[in-house]
Image (spheres, rainbow, N blue to C red):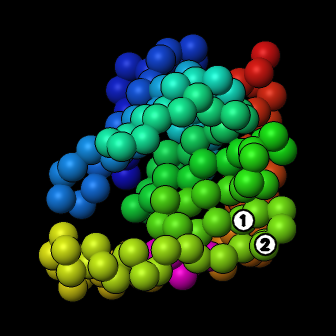
Amino acid sequence: MRTPKDLAAGDLVVSRNRKWNGKDHWVVPGTYLGADEHGWWIFQGAHEFCSRPGAAFYAESDAVLLVPRSGEYVATFYDEAHPAGVQVYVDLDVIRTVDRGVYVDDEDEFAEHRIDMDYPADVVDRITAASDQLYQAVKAQQPPFDGADREWFRRGRA
């Protein structure tokens, strides 16, 4: 179980994501909102500067990041202003959009990375199982994918 230390509502949190091989990936600033039974919630407002090697942009919509108490993923919830209609993006590429519903994206990329970054077999098994489980949870709108993010959006915008 994860337990972040010394966080207070309103604190700046910078999410620094890395690939399996340790290389830099997305860097996104946010504001810590608080915690509930699902995990720790971070508000990432529109117009924040987001970057990764080779790409950078100002966010076009508000988002709320959930770092769950357990599990090997983070989930980002987007508001209705997201330009591609994304509502939920779980970092194992489980996505819910307005137009397509719930789907798993980039399975070909995962297969390539599995070889290029030499993922151990047990890691592949855990990621695949977690992706399947999260797909079912998002599709069935099970907590925290049941609208739990709405209250955190409200707090982030207050």
**Is 73 left, or right, of 57 in this rendering?**
left
Q: Picture coordinates of residue 110 (x, y %)?
A: 37, 76
**Residue 120 seen in this snapshot:** yes
Q: Amino acid at mark 1?
A: Arg
**Residue 33 seen in this snapshot:** no
Task: Give the secondary structure at mark 2.
Answer: strand
- Our reading of the magenta stretch's main secondary structure is helix
For the residues bearing labels 1 and 2, Cβ distance under 8 angstroms: yes
Q: Which residue is mark 1?
A: 96
Real-space CA distance between mark 1 and mark 2, rounded to the nearest whole angstrom? 5 Å
Give me the residue at 49% from left, 74% from top.
Answer: 106
Give me the residue at 54% from left, 82% from top.
Answer: 132
Q: Which residue is mark 2?
A: 101
Note whether 121 is above or below 145 in the view shown: below
Q: Picture coordinates of residue 134 (x, y %)?
A: 58, 72
Task: Give the secondary structure at mark 1.
Answer: strand
Note whether 21 is above or below 127 in the view shown: above
Dot 2, crowdedness within 10 Å: few (<14), some or many (≥20)? few
Q: Which residues are magenta?
A: 130-135
Give me the residue at 70% from left, 34% from top.
Answer: 60
Pick the quarter of the image with the C terminus. top right
Q: Nearer the viewer, residue 58 or 131?
A: 58
Q: Picture coordinates of residue 153 (x, y %)?
A: 76, 33
